[in-house]
Amino acid sequence: MKIANEILIPELARLLASGKEVRFTPSGVSMRPFIEGDRDSVILAPLNKAPKVGDILLAEVVMLCGQKTYVLHRLVRIEGETLVLQGDGNLAGEERCLRADVIGKVVRIENMNGKRKMLTKGRLWYLLKPVRKWLLKIYRHTVLPVYRNTEK
């Protein structure tokens, strides 16, 4: 069952603020190949320490049009008080927020069978940015069909 972000995220924030970890299944393809939307689950923990480059964060961001939205993206840079986020599957585009806008940090990723996936800082993936377009295309045509066949 899908729950609208406007309902889900404030509840996740409330639970995280009380010190609990929470699990949810994100949608979308922006964190591909590390998080497969509508298949993988993420476990979030409260952000008790300063975030580090490479952390995957759930944060509220303001889009260019001025509308607020939520993203589950990787921290790629820190510019003073501003955190710069980008989805691993995004070839361009970044979001900016303040630490106060961070709702939680991913501490674990699990596939649809409940098995843990490797949680990396994404450093090598970030360095591969110039060739990500082709790597993601290969992923979509080789790995995703295997995923789809195992779901049946």
Image (cartoon, grey):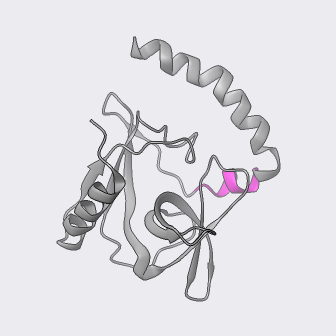
Q: Is residue 114 left or right of residue 118?
A: left
Specify the quadrant that holds the N terminus.
top left
Quadrant hosting residue 16: bottom left
Q: Is residue 140 left or right of residue 22?
A: right
Q: Nearer the viewer, residue 113 or 60?
A: 60
Quadrant hosting residue 81: bottom right
| 91 shown above or below 148 | below
In magenta stretch: residue 62:
no
Q: Residue 7: horizontal and vertical position, in percent? A: 27, 57
Q: Residue 4: horizontal and vertical position, in percent? A: 33, 50
Quadrant hosting residue 46: bottom left
Q: Is residue 119 left or right of residue 81?
A: left
Q: Nearer the viewer, residue 88 or 8?
A: 8
Magenta span? 122-128
Q: For the point 49% across and 21% down, which residue is it? A: 147
Check the image and name the residue furthest to the bottom: 80
| 85 shown above or below 39 | below
Q: For the point 50% across and 64% down, which residue is it? A: 55
Q: Is residue 1 left or right of residue 104?
A: left
Q: Residue 86: horizontal and vertical position, in percent? A: 61, 60
- Total labels: the figure holds 0
Q: Nearer the viewer, residue 72 or 56?
A: 72
Check the image and name the residue furthest to the right: 130
Q: For the point 72% across and 31% down, which residue is it? A: 137
Q: Nearer the viewer, residue 8 or 85?
A: 8
Q: Residue 92: horizontal and vertical position, in percent? A: 73, 56
Specify the quadrant that holds the C terminus.
top left
Q: For the point 44% across and 67% down, which residue is it? A: 59
Q: Main secondary structure of the magenta part?
A: helix
